[in-house]
């Protein structure tokens, strides 16, 4: 179908492109600076159908948008899976771009999903808010550490409310520590303002999304977790089986089997950590509202401990979400049958 396969090794300032013909034969290599006008010169030189393949990297956004605008078919390859196929002791940019073109020609490349721009923007908003929350938590933990170091017992369960902050400021810390705490409290306030602002922006973007109306029926999934799930999944139909979705969400355990021995290991790290976090955090709330799911969690906790139990519960919740989105049906509570 394609006269030429082009492997592209993307870097920060330039890219190396290798051209392979329909027989998989190497034709040429090109080094092009990452400017649209230079890419125009290269791609406009082809009159026959072409396809571009490049490995996923943190700076792929502009390239995907450029190729989409030019109407050039492309594949974003999974670098982890392709690395298992194309390993060599000595390699360079020309080798990388050539191999990825030849893998595409042989239909052996492992593709990654490229979300549309509007979902990429929602991802960035959700992930940025998550990072800010982590930084704010670190600051709060630091304040708690200073309170413990100097044996100040807060009279409030939540010490970062209005009254709690006034109480902290009245404590007799050494001058240097008082200065550090003052700075940390100021940063916490700034972070909180930005986090609240991002919450409003995220809510405005997803409030009318059809999947949000479905996800909001789950006790434990609010605006933030719904935004994460929507932006990371994009289209639930791209997962043909629920097991594929569970693996993508990072909630599947690795399994190694040999003869009659089966060993189950840790969670798969080559997965979407943002979805995993969202489902685990949501499960912690859902078990407080859904008695059937709570019974499942308590059973697992008794035999496996809290950590493995909440992951198993999050896995069960993710399965529910998969079928909810697939069938566009609201959440159904798990009823406990009377003995």
Image (cartoon, rainbow, N blue to C red):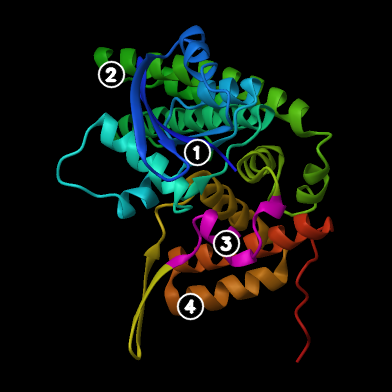
Give the mark nearest the N terminus, 1 or 3: 1
Separation of marks 2 and 4 at Cα, in angstroms: 43 Å
Query: Magenta stretch: residue 105 in it?
Result: no
Number of residues whose C-alpha sits closer than 10 Å to that of mark 2, classed few (under 14), some (14–19) or many (20 or more): few
In this rendering, the label closer to the viewer, 1 or 4: 1
Q: Which residue is mark 4?
A: 302
Q: Which residue is mark 3?
A: 244
Which quadrant would residue 18 be assigned to in this image? top left
Separation of marks 4 and 3 at Cα, in angstroms: 28 Å
Of 1 and 239, nearer the camera is 1
Q: What residue is rendered at 67% in x and 38% in y?
A: 227
Of 219 and 149, nearer the camera is 219
- Residue 12 seen in render: no
Q: Position of residue 263 (x, y in %)?
A: 35, 78
Q: Which residue is mark 1?
A: 76
Give the mark nearest the N terminus, 1 or 2: 1
On-image quarter of the N terminus: top right
Question: Judging from the image, what secondary structure is the residue with disc 1 in?
Answer: strand
Give the mark nearest the N terminus, 2 or 4: 2
> Which span is picked out in magenta?
236-253
Number of residues whose C-alpha sits closer than 10 Å to that of mark 4, classed few (under 14), some (14–19) or many (20 or more): few
Q: Position of residue 90 (x, y in %)?
A: 15, 40
Question: Judging from the image, what secondary structure is the residue with disc 4 in?
Answer: helix
Question: Judging from the image, what secondary structure is the residue with disc 2 in?
Answer: helix
Of 306 and 99, nearer the camera is 99
Q: Which residue is mark 2?
A: 177
């Amino acid at each position: 179908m394609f006269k030429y396969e082009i492997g592209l090794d993307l870097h920060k300032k330039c890219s190396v492109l290798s051209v392979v013909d329909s027989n998989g034969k190497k034709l040429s290599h090109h080094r092009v600076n990452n400017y649209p006008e230079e890419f125009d010169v290269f791609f406009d030189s082809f009159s026959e159908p072409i396809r571009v393949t490049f490995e996923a990297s943190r700076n792929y956004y502009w390239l995907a948008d450029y190729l989409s605008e030019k109407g050039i078919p492309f594949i974003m390859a999974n670098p982890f899976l392709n690395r298992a196929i194309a390993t060599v002791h000595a390699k360079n940019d020309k080798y990388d771009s050539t191999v990825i073109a030849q893998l595409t020609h042989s239909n052996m490349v492992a593709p990654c999903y490229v979300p549309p721009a509007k979902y990429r923007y929602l991802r960035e908003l959700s992930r940025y808010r998550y990072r800010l929350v982590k930084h704010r938590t670190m600051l709060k933990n630091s304040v708690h550490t200073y309170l413990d170091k100097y044996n100040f017992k807060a009279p409030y369960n939540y010490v970062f409310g209005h009254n709690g902050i006034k109480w902290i400021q009245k404590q007799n810390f050494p001058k240097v520590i008082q200065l550090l705490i003052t700075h940390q409290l100021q940063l916490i306030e700034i972070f909180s303002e930005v986090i609240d602002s991002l919450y409003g922006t995220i809510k405005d973007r997803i409030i009318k999304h059809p999947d949000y109306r479905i996800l909001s029926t789950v006790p434990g999934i609010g605006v933030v977790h719904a935004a994460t799930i929507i932006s990371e999944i994009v289209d639930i139909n791209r997962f043909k089986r629920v097991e594929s979705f569970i693996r993508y969400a990072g909630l599947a355990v690795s399994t190694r089997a040999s003869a009659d021995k089966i060993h189950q290991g840790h969670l798969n790290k080559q997965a979407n950590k943002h979805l995993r976090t969202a489902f685990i955090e949501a499960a912690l709330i859902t078990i407080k509202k859904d008695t059937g799911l709570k019974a499942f969690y308590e059973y697992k906790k008794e035999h496996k401990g809290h950590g493995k139990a909440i992951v198993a519960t999050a896995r069960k919740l993710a399965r529910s979400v998969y079928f909810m989105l697939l069938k566009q049906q609201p959440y159904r509570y798990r009823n406990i049958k009377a003995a």
